[in-house]
Image (tube, helix red, strand yellow):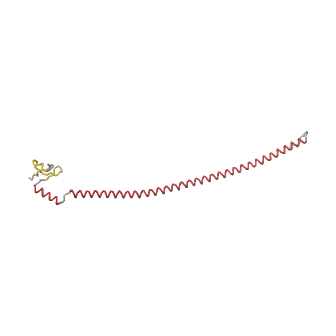
């Protein structure tokens, strides 16, 4: 406090003293408020740290959960694909056997047709003997002409049959 001035009146001194006291009270109030503000700032910073830690923890948990869900989905898809691959392999195996069976049956049918064709149009041994005897009886002469079977005929005695394609055999 300042010493009173010599020509100050007691009322003026009292007013000055009240003003100083009021200023001092305001200064104390300001200090208390500054302390409370500092405490509030510390509390907010502490609260922000907790929020940051909570957010970091929540983000980590969310990332782990999302990664786990993705892994589960991928695992499920892989299992599904493995099942489909297994099924496809079985179907391909069945298709392969079916194709083999169809090919074998087709070859068997072709072989049966070939055997029937050969049996139907190939003369029997008796038929061959009969034809040889008939050719000998008529005196026919057989030969090979440029890789084809030939028989000697009389050119001037042709034109027999419905289509006029028969000739008399030259029995020389």
Q: Quadrant of residue 124?
A: bottom left
Is residue 26 or residue 3 the one in the foreground?
Answer: 26
- Determine whether 82 is above or below 3 in the image: below
Residue 84's spot in the image, x, y percent? 45, 56
Q: Residue furthest toward the top?
A: 7
Number of marks in the rendered image: 0
Give left or right: position of 126 versus 89.
left
Residue 121's spot in the image, x, y percent? 21, 56
Q: Residue furthest toward the left?
A: 172
Residue 85's spot in the image, x, y percent? 44, 56
Q: Residue furthest toward the bottom?
A: 126
Residue 27's spot in the image, x, y percent? 80, 45
Give left or right: position of 33 versus 99.
right
Q: Residue furthest toward the front?
A: 162
Q: Quadrant of residue 103?
A: bottom left
The quadrant of the picture occupied by the N terminus is top right
């Amino acid at each position: 406090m300042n010493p009173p001035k010599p020509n100050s009146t007691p009322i003026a001194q009292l007013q000055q003293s009240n003003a100083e006291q009021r200023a001092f009270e305001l200064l104390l109030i300001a200090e208390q408020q500054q302390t409370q503000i500092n405490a509030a700032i510390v509390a907010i910073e502490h609260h922000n740290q907790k929020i940051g830690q909570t957010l970091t923890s929540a983000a980590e948990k969310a990332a782990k959960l999302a990664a786990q869900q993705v892994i589960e989905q991928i695992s499920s898809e892989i299992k599904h694909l493995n099942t489909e691959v297994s099924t496809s392999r079985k179907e391909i195996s069945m298709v392969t056997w079916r194709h083999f069976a169809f090919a074998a049956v087709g070859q068997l049918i072709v072989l049966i047709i070939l055997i029937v064709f050969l049996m139907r149009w190939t003369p029997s041994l008796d038929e061959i003997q009969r034809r040889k005897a008939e050719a000998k009886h008529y005196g026919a002469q057989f030969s090979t002409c440029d890789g084809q079977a030939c028989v000697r005929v009389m050119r001037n005695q042709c034109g027999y049959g419905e289509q006029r394609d028969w000739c008399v055999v030259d029995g020389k």
